[in-house]
Image (tube, rainbow, N blue to C red):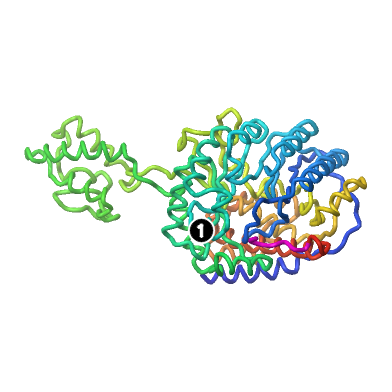
């Protein structure tokens, strides 16, 4: 659509100008803001297999290098403590953080001893969903995010993940076995692979639902320059023209209304009773036929249900729904009459016949399972399995809940105040810096006040709600005053469901526009990583995508 293409072009230009690194000689991150609680990101850049679509800092796994790295990662964590940061949440990403499970556990244990952590979120791969790993992670990790990408064996082979991480059926089984041990288990998926048909996508969504995962994240495939060539050589060239259709399929299957079996069972029984009464000449017939048409979606949406053997159209009162015009309802037997009254209620039959989908939105591309939709796993948002709040559940995009955060590890990216810092991508340089007693900051970029407003606008709306009062308190102007062009574009595009003095929320179209915005922003961040990667020593520069 036109708004998607325009937004893509604008975001590309914005990120190209904004996310430009300049060297820094700073040895430590800035001091924290007094009284503020932070999330700490820790990066583990080692993988058993380098995926062709990933542009994060990652290297082929070598145990000796990985163990030395974990030792220094724990040292850097203590540096963060010594700076005075109050850390309440930790996110460990990669790479593959579970590449050395004993080293990872030592890092988490140190973090819990050092900070008053409420939660730990950690990434992993499907081959690590085994009892020996799960036993060590449960209790230490509240949210486990599993890099599934797809359950389709053909796509897994294209991504070179099939042999190493298992086939789709095996991955589903492992997720089902692991889910009960964590507050949240996220199935990390991707969509819009060139070889992915609508049928493959639908199958992937159905398998996520069947797996029992308490959360799923569906990322659009992102062809940043660093992976564009490897993507084309392995899975093909990305086609953004069909991205919106795929996104709508995902949303509909995960959150859309589904048939309510209990409703239809009762309706079929009562339809037979009504038709029997009609046969005795006491009411007009045809309710059974109408209900069968409704069940088959053959009943016009404008029809109420039935009257004198005809469909009732818009304009007739809802009370005309169940039985014919001028019928004495006292003639209807009590068993049938109760259901007839229910059918005459103001709730349309089209809604009465359905239940909410098994998931609800946590962000524009994160979906949290409704607490009643799964019997496995603890409820989101509570280690006690109660009080689930999908809007507050941990998600991969931690920047939604923590706008500012420090990061440790090679390739970590920090955002504090106006400044975005990037740690060296060289593991060798990282180890030398930490062993020398200082952090490994290699570059930074500074946001203008307008850039910070845009960042807030994007991150909060990606999280489905922008707090207008907080925006004005933080920036000294309304969002309309600070971002008139952005507000005009989103308004004209039909992006806002609510736009009042308190908040902005999104329509389905608005949610897709946020997917586009975040896709382009992340491509811009990947370009930032490429700038950092360009400074790698020659012996580390060969990041072999897809090898």
Q: Is residue 327 above or below residue 151?
A: above
Query: Could you say which quadrant of the image residue 37 lies in?
Result: top right
Image coordinates of residue 190 in percent, x first then y, are: 55, 56
Camera-side residue of 321 and 48: 48
- In the image, residue 418 sits, relative to residue 141, either above or below, namely below
Give the secondary structure at mark 1.
helix
Q: Nearer the viewer, residue 262 or 336?
A: 262
> In what quadrant of the picture does the C terminus appear?
bottom right
Q: Nearer the viewer, residue 24 or 99?
A: 99
> In the picture provided, is 208 more to the left or to the right than 269?
right
- Residue 544 at what x, y percent from top left? 69, 62
What's the magenta bit mostly, secondary-structure-wise? loop
Q: Position of residue 108 (x, y in %)?
A: 73, 36
Q: Quadrant of residue 71?
A: top right
343 displayed left or right of 149: left
Residue 14 place in picture, x, y as percent: 70, 68
Q: Residue at x 78, y 65 (%)?
A: 531
**Residue 242: in sight, yes or no?**
yes
Region rendered in magenta: 541-547
Give me the residue at 56% from left, 68% from top.
238
Q: Is residue 85 magenta?
A: no
Q: Residue furthest left?
A: 280
Q: Is residue 109 left or right of residue 235?
A: right
Q: How many marks?
A: 1
Give yes or no for residue 542 being in the magenta stretch.
yes
Number of residues whose C-alpha sits closer than 10 Å to that of mark 1, classed few (under 14), some (14–19) or many (20 or more): many
Q: Identify residue for label 1.
A: 155
Can residue 421 be seen by looking at this rendering?
Answer: no
């Amino acid at each position: 659509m036109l708004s998607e293409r325009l937004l893509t072009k604008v975001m590309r230009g914005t990120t190209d100008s904004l996310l430009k690194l300049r060297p820094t000689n700073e040895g430590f991150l800035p001091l924290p803001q007094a009284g503020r609680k932070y999330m700490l990101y820790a990066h583990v850049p080692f993988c058993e297999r380098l995926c062709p679509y990933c542009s994060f800092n990652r290297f082929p796994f070598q145990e000796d290098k990985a163990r030395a790295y974990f030792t220094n990662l724990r040292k850097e964590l203590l540096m963060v403590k010594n700076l005075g940061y109050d850390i309440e949440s930790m996110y460990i990403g990669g790479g593959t953080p579970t590449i050395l499970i004993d080293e990872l556990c030592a890092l988490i244990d140190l973090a819990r001893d050092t900070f008053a952590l409420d939660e730990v979120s950690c990434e992993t791969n499907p081959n690590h969903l085994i009892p020996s790993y799960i036993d060590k992670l449960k209790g230490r990790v509240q949210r486990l995010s599993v890099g599934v990408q797809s359950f389709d064996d053909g796509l897994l082979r294209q991504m070179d993940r099939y042999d190493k991480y298992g086939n789709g059926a095996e991955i589903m089984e492992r997720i089902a076995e692991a889910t009960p041990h964590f507050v949240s288990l996220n199935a990390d998926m991707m969509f819009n692979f060139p070889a992915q048909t609508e049928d493959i996508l639908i199958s992937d969504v159905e398998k996520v639902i069947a797996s029992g995962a308490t959360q799923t994240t569906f990322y659009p495939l992102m062809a940043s320059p660093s992976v564009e060539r490897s993507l084309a050589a392995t899975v093909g060239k990305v086609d953004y023209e069909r991205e919106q259709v795929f996104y709508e399929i995902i949303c509909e299957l995960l959150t859309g209304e589904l048939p309510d079996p209990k409703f239809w069972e009762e309706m079929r029984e009562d339809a037979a009773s009504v038709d029997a009464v009609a046969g005795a000449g006491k009411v007009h017939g045809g309710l059974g036929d109408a209900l069968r048409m409704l069940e088959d979606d053959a009943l016009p949406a404008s029809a109420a249900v039935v009257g004198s053997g005809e469909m009732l159209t818009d304009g007739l009162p809802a009370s005309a729904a169940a039985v014919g015009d001028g019928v004495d309802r006292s003639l209807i037997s009590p068993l049938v009459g109760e259901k007839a009254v229910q059918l005459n209620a103001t709730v349309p039959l089209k809604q009465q016949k359905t239940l909410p989908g098994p998931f609800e939105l946590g962000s524009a591309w994160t979906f949290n399972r409704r607490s009643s939709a799964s019997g496995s796993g603890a409820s989101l948002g509570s280690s006690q399995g109660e009080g689930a709040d999908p809007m507050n559940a941990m998600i991969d995009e931690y920047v939604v809940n923590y706008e500012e955060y420090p990061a440790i590890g090679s390739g970590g990216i920090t955002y504090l105040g106006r400044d975005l810092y990037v740690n060296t991508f060289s593991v060798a340089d990282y180890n030398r810096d930490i062993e020398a007693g200082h952090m490994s900051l290699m570059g930074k970029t500074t946001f203008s006040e307008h850039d910070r407003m845009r960042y807030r606008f994007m991150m909060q709306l990606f999280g489905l709600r922008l707090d207008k009062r907080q925006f004005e308190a933080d920036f000294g102007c309304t969002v309309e005053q600070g971002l008139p062009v952005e507000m005009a574009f989103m308004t004209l595009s039909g992006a806002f469901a609510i736009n009042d003095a308190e908040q902005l929320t999104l329509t389905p179209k608005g949610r897709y526009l946020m997917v586009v915005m975040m896709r382009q922003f992340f491509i811009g961040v990947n370009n930032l990583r490429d700038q950092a990667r360009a400074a790698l020593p020659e012996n580390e520069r060969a990041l072999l995508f897809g090898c």
